[in-house]
Image (tube, rainbow, N blue to C red):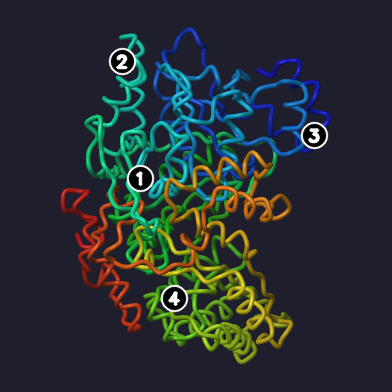
Amino acid sequence: MLNKQVEKILPLVQKPARYTGGELNCVVKNKDDIKLRFAFCFPDTYEIGMSHLGMKILYSLINDRKDAWCERVFAPWIDMEEQMRKNDIPLYALESGDPISEFDIIGFTMQYELSYTNVLNMLDLAKIPVFSKDRAGLSQIVIAGGPCVCNPEPLADFIDIFLLGEGEEITNELIDLLIEHKENNSTKQEFLKDACKIQGVYIPAFYDVLYNKDGTIKDVVAKQGAPKKVKKRIIRNLDNAHYPSHFVVPFIETVHDRAVEEIFRGCIRGCRFCQAGFIYRPIREKSAKVANEQCKTLCDTSGYDEASLCSLSTSDYTQISELLNDMLDWTKDEMINVSLPSLRIDNFSDELIEKLKLIRRSGLTFAPEAGTQRLRDAINKNITQEEVLKTCNKAFEGGWTSVKLYFMLGLPTETMDDVSGIASLAQMVVDEFYKNPNKPKGKGVNVSVSASSFVPKPFTPFQWEPQDTAQMLIDKQSHLQQSITTRKIKLSWHDVSTSVLEGVFARGDRKLCSVLYTAWKKGCKFDGWDEHFKFDLWQQSFEECLVSPEFYANRKREFEEILPWDHLDYGIDKNFLIKENQKAHSATTTPHCRQKCAGCGSNGLNGGKCDAIG
């Protein structure tokens, strides 16, 4: 319910539907009937946040409870924030229109390091103290989850509780505990001391970080009864896990405006650069029967005419043929398009092509990641040039004329020959189209090459590797551009300075809290948006705080060094990661999980079970 102040400013901003609420399937409750209010905050725009599956799951999960009410909160765009501050309107939740300062839990999902300043900005806009030490009592408990919290240290001064791993069970347990402590009139400290006993709860205030003279970490000391190492949470059985029967349907177009059905978690591949491929292990598959039923329900309740099957590698789902057969029974009649993102080059079968012909006709996307076989072996991509060309050939024969290829620049051991290899491989794909006698008649080919900058991430074999400097990445981008000689290939790349900052915060420690606060106070926000990224202000902030960004981004770390996230347990054995790092430097591959278990250790989180190995 919007108040009149908000109604007055909406005509003054772009896309006012971002700020109104009232969409189909949104949940509105009577405040008198509930015991706890939860503000689910996404530190980016409405269009991006409304596309996030994790928010949809937890929004539905919490609102299924009779004693709690979850509402959505997004970062207002610059024009809206200006009007809110000018008119003294605090940040509010979409469902009720109430200020989020009135809520018990303010939960952030941390998907991207460059959204950190938005967290501080949203708290400040809500008139909530940004430092956790300045928030007392059992309301305004600020929590955070998501992939970035596998190294939460750069946010340690601002967040009360980090939730490690998957949120379906731990969120309910935390809500139960907070309700109990509110009824007992407990202090915040008493609540936190009990909360840290829940597996997956990390309370940074209960840990002291000691440093060596060279700036590396000497020790992390747990106190207040907190565990020495915090173990992440997982959902053991996806068929029994909560999944929404309704999605909130936005009034305006969002980034992924469709029904989304998650089919499995984890990844069998073990690409050495990919954080998601490790932190979401062990592999757990949802049955085709359950996935089909859930997907149909979502389409029925939302009215979407597109459904996307979500996973890290959709074609690795063992029941993909069965699921597509089941879905074709109703999607064809109801004119619903089925999208399969994250397809693998080495299992793009003839059978899958035939099914894709029936359910979609859009561009195909593949990720060779590197331009030469040596570098693909070093990163454990486990695909060959022949497989890339054969797969594209199949796609062209199947009627496709548009292929997007994802690559990375700055991978460990990369040379300029590897960079020019990207252009060579893309040219081979173009040539393959024109050599194919069964290609679509009267049409040309469009090959898009996207070259992102490699960022070393925690809990990967490359967590010890230095990131390329900004100048090194710029030189590689220039070399790649010069290596492309045809207009049939369209090249795009990421801004180097944002990748540099991402590299700093991905592997940083608590010293970055002061840098983050300083940069925000100088006006940094929406750092992931090129038009608002102010790298000069970040550089000033590092200098004022006497913190070297190069220390975090561009320094090779020894295996013996204590890393800022070593007191957190994501189930991946550190010795396994070390061996994988060593194999990368000899360009030696590791078979994927269904061929041979490499002993990463993640099945220990699931009682020894991993769906990749039975």
Q: CA distance from mark 1 to mark 3?
A: 43 Å
Residue 180, label in figure: 2
Image x and y of residue 564, in percent? 36, 52
- Kind of residue indicated by mark 2: Glu
Residue under the image location 68 percent in, 76 percent down: 446
User: In this rendering, would 591 be left or right of 153?
Assistant: left
User: In this rendering, would 437 be left or right of 293?
Assistant: right
Image x and y of residue 537, in percent? 67, 50
Return the residue nearer the eye: 519 or 579: 519
For disc 1, the marked residue is 290
Viewer-nearest of labels 1 and 3?
Answer: 3
Q: Are marks 2 and 3 in contact (CB under 8 Å)?
A: no
- Kind of residue indicated by mark 4: Pro
Residue that extends furthest to the front in the rendered view of this protein: 213
Badge 1 element: helix
Residue 412, label in figure: 4
Residue 335, label in figure: none
